[in-house]
Image: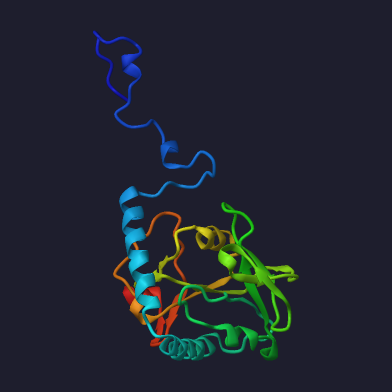
């Protein structure tokens, strides 16, 4: 607060050099923290560049890289019997893990897919088996028509970009950020992406949640590797 000068009115003494609390840094409608505008601009430009580079990779090469990512997932996850594992339906050149997801039931695991239910709400995970129907969801990404809501033991999350500390750059909607922050602490969060999506930093903010690891076609990245 400004110091009171004898010649100032009481109203003038109430002026602040900066807002008196941190409420100006939160969205009054959603309660979510407002990001640094410079970081928002940087992430938007970086996101567009990374997606364009990913889409420029020939489809046959993306399939080959996806199979290598699946092999690394098998190695790091090991026996998945009895586990609930959420993956995703590929979008805009993401690694295609659909065959891996469809094979979970044969390995004794329960597969699941994320569903957007509300713009400002966390994702809901619904169980899904390969013979069950899907319907178009947000951005026309297929989601289970009749799956039950589940809490995954493992979440496989696609990344647009990732840094050495396993912070994830996503599409900017905040769905995964809200979801991962709300999950039980026992949930294992594994990011997947191509090696070319590695960047120096995503400039993590308070709401960003680091993955346990990132799996690429070349292997596994963990936060410990950056220390």
Question: Is 76 above or below relative to 2?
Answer: below
Q: Which residue is rendered at x = 47% and y = 86% of the image?
A: 66
Quadrant where the N terminus is found in the figure: top left
Against 98, is 3 above or below? above
Q: What kind of colouring is applied to the model shown? A: rainbow
Q: Position of residue 18 (x, y in %)?
A: 32, 32
- Residue 166 in percent (x, y) is at 40, 71
Left or right side of 44 for 178 = right
Establish if 195 lies above or below 64: above
Taking the image as drawn, is residue 200 in sight? yes
Q: Is residue 203 visible?
A: no
Q: Nearer the viewer, residue 44 or 188?
A: 44
Identify the residue shown where x is 52% and y is 82%: 96
x and y percentages locating residue 88 in the rendered image:
57, 74
Q: Quadrant of residue 40?
A: bottom left
Residue at x 49% of width, y 58% of height: 173
64, above or below 128, in the image: below
List x then y, in percent, for residue 25.
41, 41
Count of numbered badges drawn on the protein: 0
Q: Quadrant of the C terminus?
A: bottom left
Q: Nearer the viewer, residue 154 or 94?
A: 94
Q: Nearer the viewer, residue 182 or 27?
A: 27
């Amino acid at each position: 607060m400004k110091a009171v000068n004898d010649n100032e009115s009481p109203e003038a003494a109430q002026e602040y050099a900066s807002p008196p609390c941190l409420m100006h840094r939160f969205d009054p409608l959603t309660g979510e923290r407002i990001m640094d505008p410079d970081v928002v601009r940087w992430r938007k430009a970086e996101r567009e560049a990374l997606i364009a580079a990913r889409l420029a990779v020939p489809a046959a090469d993306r399939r080959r890289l996806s199979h290598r990512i699946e092999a690394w997932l098998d190695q790091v996850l090991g026996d998945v019997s009895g586990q609930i594992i959420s993956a995703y339906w590929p979008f805009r050149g993401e690694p295609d893990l659909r065959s891996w997801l469809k094979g979970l039931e044969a390995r004794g695991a329960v597969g699941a897919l994320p569903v957007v239910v509300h713009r400002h709400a966390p994702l809901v995970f619904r169980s899904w088996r390969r013979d069950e129907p899907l319907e178009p969801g947000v951005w026309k990404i297929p989601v289970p028509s009749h799956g039950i809501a589940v809490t995954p033991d493992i979440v496989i999350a696609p990344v647009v970009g990732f840094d050495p500390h396993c912070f994830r750059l996503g599409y900017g909607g905040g769905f995964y950020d809200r979801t991962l922050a709300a999950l039980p602490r026992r949930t294992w969060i594994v990011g997947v992406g191509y090696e070319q999506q590695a960047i120096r930093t995503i400039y993590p903010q308070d709401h960003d949640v680091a993955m346990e690891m990132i799996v690429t076609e070349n292997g596994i990245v963990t936060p410990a590797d950056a220390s």
